[in-house]
Each structure stands twice: as structure tokens, then as C-alpha cells.
Image (spheres, grey):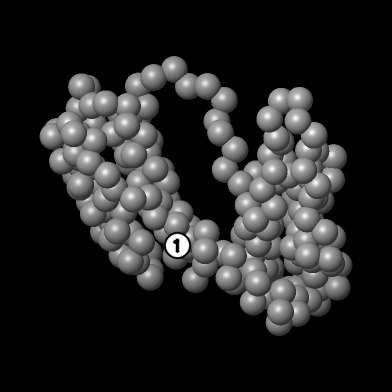
Amino acid sequence: MKLLPLVLVLAACNQKPSGPPPSTGSAGSAGAAGAPPVASVAPADDLCRAGMDAIDHASCGSGAGQLAATRKSLETITATVQNTGTTDPHAYDMTCARLVDAIDHDAKKTGCTLAIDAATRARIGKLTDEYYAQRTPVTPTGDAAADAMITKLAAMRDAACACKDQACLDKADEQLVAIPAMPATAPQAARDLASKLLDDAQRCSQRVKML
């Protein structure tokens, strides 16, 4: 999805003081204050480490230097988890899977082939499919004007998530531009739901770019 329309709608949906953003699957998520960190996933099952190993054994041409630089992003995630632990191993796995998948996707453009075995590749595929398949359920808020806007936004989200190419995404963008701003009287629940629906659409847009 294009950035400008997203920014305009989000600006209308978030008319409240913003605190620190919540963690959404970050590898550095920590537990509650004062609680001991939960141990990270075992190295043998760690997809970030598997990704680093795949980079180390990649068959590469001119893109070798660029590929080595991407390794640092995986190193940062694993180091954070090693130092702080993670309260959600599955979210950590999903983060690593998405990152390795993106690195693998971009590596192919530079003539590099990551050494990812079939079982690991299947696991990455399963986790990334799970991530991109996430959809926020739409529940009426009781505010007629806000719910009307939410209905249109959900339709745009569904259209974007059905896309298989950029031309389709461009049409979904046109739908987004035509959606009016959230009413000033809309309850916070409607604003939060609108933001989540936009996140869904953005996630689907990212998926199309990975095809």
C-alpha cells in the first residue's frame, strides 16, 4: 500500500497521546518488570541462527558483501534474545522466519543462493504463511458513523489481501483514498480497530511484494 494514504488515515485514527509502541513479536520482548526472562528457544531450533548458517554457506557472486551485511540483523536479534530471553518463542520464530525469508528473497536478485535445507525452508514457509494470514476480526463498536467507516476499511483490507500483483494493490489504494476520515466523535475502540485493519492491509501488501 502507498505510504501517503496510510499516513492520512492513521492520522485521523490516532488523535490521542501516544505512549511507547507495544511489542509485536520483537525478538527482544521482555517479561513483566522484575520477572526473570524466559529462556530463548534452543539453538538447534533457532531460525535466526539457521539463517546465519545459511548465509555463511551461501553460493554467491557479486552480492556476497551485501549478503554478509544482512547477517548482522540476524545477529542482533539472537544476541538480544540471548541476553534478555523471550516471553514468546513462537513470535520470535515468526520474526526470524520473516527476516530469513526476506533475506533469501533479496539474495536471489543478486545471484546468491542461501544454503537452506528443505525442512528448514518448509518451516519458514509455514511461519510466514501464518504471519501473512492474520486478519483482525471486525466487531461493531455501536457508533453508526464509525462502524460505516470501519465497514469500508474492512472491504479495502479484504481486497488488498486478495491481491496477487501490484496492479491489484493499486486498485485497493484507490479504495483507501476514497474512504472518509474517522468521525471526530468515534470511540477509541473504532480508532484502534481502524489502525489494525490498516496493519492487515499493509501486511498483505508486503506479501505481494514477496511473491
**Res 181 seen here:** no
Vertical placement of 28 versus 171: above or below?
Answer: above
Quarter of the figure with residue 3: top left
Residue that sits furthest to the left in the current view:
144
Quarter of the figure with residue 5: top left
Label 1 sits on what residue type?
A: Ala
Residue that sits furthest to the bottom in the current view:
118
Q: Whole-percent x and y of residue 91?
A: 63, 52
Q: Whole-percent x and y of residue 125?
A: 59, 71
User: Which residue occupies the foreground of this view, 107 or 207?
Assistant: 207
Vertical placement of 58 versus 93: above or below?
Answer: below
Judging by the rendered image, the residue that carries numbered circle 1 is 133
Q: Secondary structure at mark 1?
A: loop
**Res 171 seen here:** yes
Q: Is residue 201 left or right of residue 89?
A: left
Number of other residues with Cα within 10 Å of mark 1, as a class: few under 14, some 14 to 19, many 20 or more:
some
Q: How many marks?
A: 1
User: Which residue occupies the foreground of this view, 67 or 94?
Assistant: 94
Vertical placement of 211 versus 65: above or below?
Answer: below
Q: Looking at the image, which residue is at 75% across and 79% down?
A: 117
Q: Looking at the image, which residue is at 31% across and 54% down?
A: 157
Q: Looking at the image, which residue is at 69% across and 52% down?
A: 89
Q: Is residue 41 left or right of residue 171?
A: right
Q: Whole-percent x and y of residue 10?
A: 36, 34
Residue that sits furthest to the front in the current view:
35
Q: Whole-percent x and y of residue 54?
A: 80, 70
Q: Looking at the image, which residue is at 55% across and 30% down?
A: 21
Q: Is residue 154 left or right of residue 112?
A: left
